[in-house]
Image: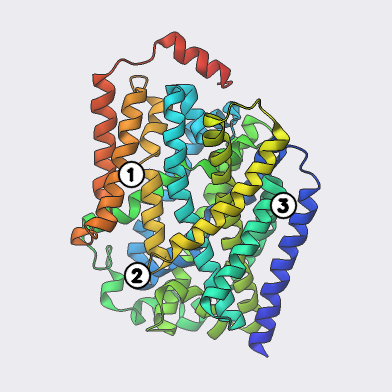
Amino acid sequence: MRDTVILASVCAYVALMVVIGVWASKKVKNNHDFMLAGQRLGRMILIGTLLATWTGAGTIMGRASFSYTYGPLASIFYSIGAPLGILVLYLFLAKRIRQFGKYTVPEIMESRYGKSVRLVTAIAILIAYTAIMSEQVTGLGYILHMTTGFPEAVAKMIGLVVIIFLAFAGGLISVAYTDAVSALLITLGLIGAVIFVLVTVGGFSGMVEQLPADHLTLTGGLSPIQMIGFVLPTLLLILGDQNMYQRFAAARTPEVARRSTLGFLIGDVVFYAAVIILASSAAILLPGIQPDTSILRLATDTLPLGLGAIMLMAATAFIITTGNSYLLSSAGNLVHDIYRSFSKRAHDSKRELFLTRVAVVVLGISAFTIGEAFPGVLEIQVFSYTMYGATITPSLMAAFFWKRATAAGCIASMIAGIVSTLVWEFVLDKPNEWNSVIVALPLSLLALVVVSLSTRPRQPEEIRASLEAGRV
């Protein structure tokens, strides 16, 4: 009976998302609607889509895995990257991003550095985002496997189809409205679950008494360098995340974009706190389980039936919304930045809409394949965040804040970030258990600074003309 109710709840949520996707598809008239929702998102919808997009499998499974393994105090330190990044977005970037009004980060980079940078940036984003999408496919596969009993590979395929459909049908209109519904569901599920598990373990004092000693240290047994290796990828990703930039660009006005960031910050802190409490409680109530599934197992094995069903629906919401958001975003890179670089055809919005939808399908299948190369969601999360953060973010921040940065320095920085991340992860197999950001970020920054200072910068009038064209 319990399994049947939970399965029916998850299926009902997925069906609702499909209905919203079909409704949204009727509102898509051109690629501007598909990619930026016609730039008509209000503050509440924007807050919802920012929250639901950011808190995907990396939160409900990756961050939960960290909390289950290393304890609540280490998890608080691990989680500070996102709030710090959101604060920077609020203070310095959100309004400016909306004023750009661009589809993609490579377009912003081109406005600052010139055309040579756009293609390299797009390729780097595709690599990182395909890995992030694979997190979501893996996570949704976990949920469907646990609720349906289907083999994990089959469950992942079903999850992939759902994620692809929602991105394919309505673009950002579909994603934004399903995100808003999901954000409400996520909030209700997390609050109810936190109250229940705290009562079950005897409150915070009971949690402290029952957790292992190493779970109550500031680093959870990790070295300081290892801890920094977990904190930096999240901070770097959110500072330069194209998904966030596209949502700010889709806001009704620049001021709506800026004010929405405060709601995003508050929601992010609440969600992270809830995940830390739930996963740490799972370490007490469900010892010895797979860390990635700690919150999911609370829903199926510990929480009351109704609350467990809501939690699994919320977890599904986390994952689907993030998956189709990153899928849509990377499809934009493939069409707007790579296809346009090689095509000599005149700009045709309807043709690009068709090509963007084809790209959604191709990239979704690629994400499924990449996910098979990693042992768990946390490992995919750290790799993909580093690939983006160490490769894209330094040059993107320099575009806003360092006038001396050059196109050559930007390209050198991105190449250094890509190569060092891949070599550290897959050739050297993470020496000393250090995450690749410890090596990739310094090398990326060094290449940016040294090559920029060694090469001729664009003239002020060139930069000014580009920025004016970008409506800054």
Q: Earlier in the sequence, mark 1 or mark 3?
A: 3
Q: Quadrant of the N terminus?
A: bottom right
Query: Element under label 3?
Result: helix
- Return the x and y of residue 123 as percentages of the image width and height: 44, 40
Query: Element under label 1?
Result: helix
Rendered image quadrant of residue 209:
bottom left
Instruction: Quickly name the residue at label 1.
Output: 418
Residue at screen point 38% across, 28% down: 398
Crowdedness of circle 2 by 10 Å Cα count: few (<14), some, many (20+)? many
- The residue type indicated by label 2 comes to Gly
- Return the x and y of residue 366 as percentages of the image width and height: 50, 56
Crowdedness of circle 1 by 10 Å Cα count: few (<14), some, many (20+)? many
Crowdedness of circle 3 by 10 Å Cα count: few (<14), some, many (20+)? many
Q: Is residue 71 above or below residue 395?
A: below
Q: Quadrant of the C terminus?
A: top right
Instruction: Quickly name the residue at label 3.
Output: 169
- Return the x and y of residue 301 as percentages of the image width and height: 54, 85
Instruction: Quickly name the residue at label 2.
Output: 71
Residue at screen point 66% across, 73% down: 10
- The residue type indicated by label 3 comes to Ala
37, 362: nearer the viewer? 362
Q: Earlier in the sequence, mark 2 or mark 1?
A: 2
Residue at screen point 48% across, 52% down: 130
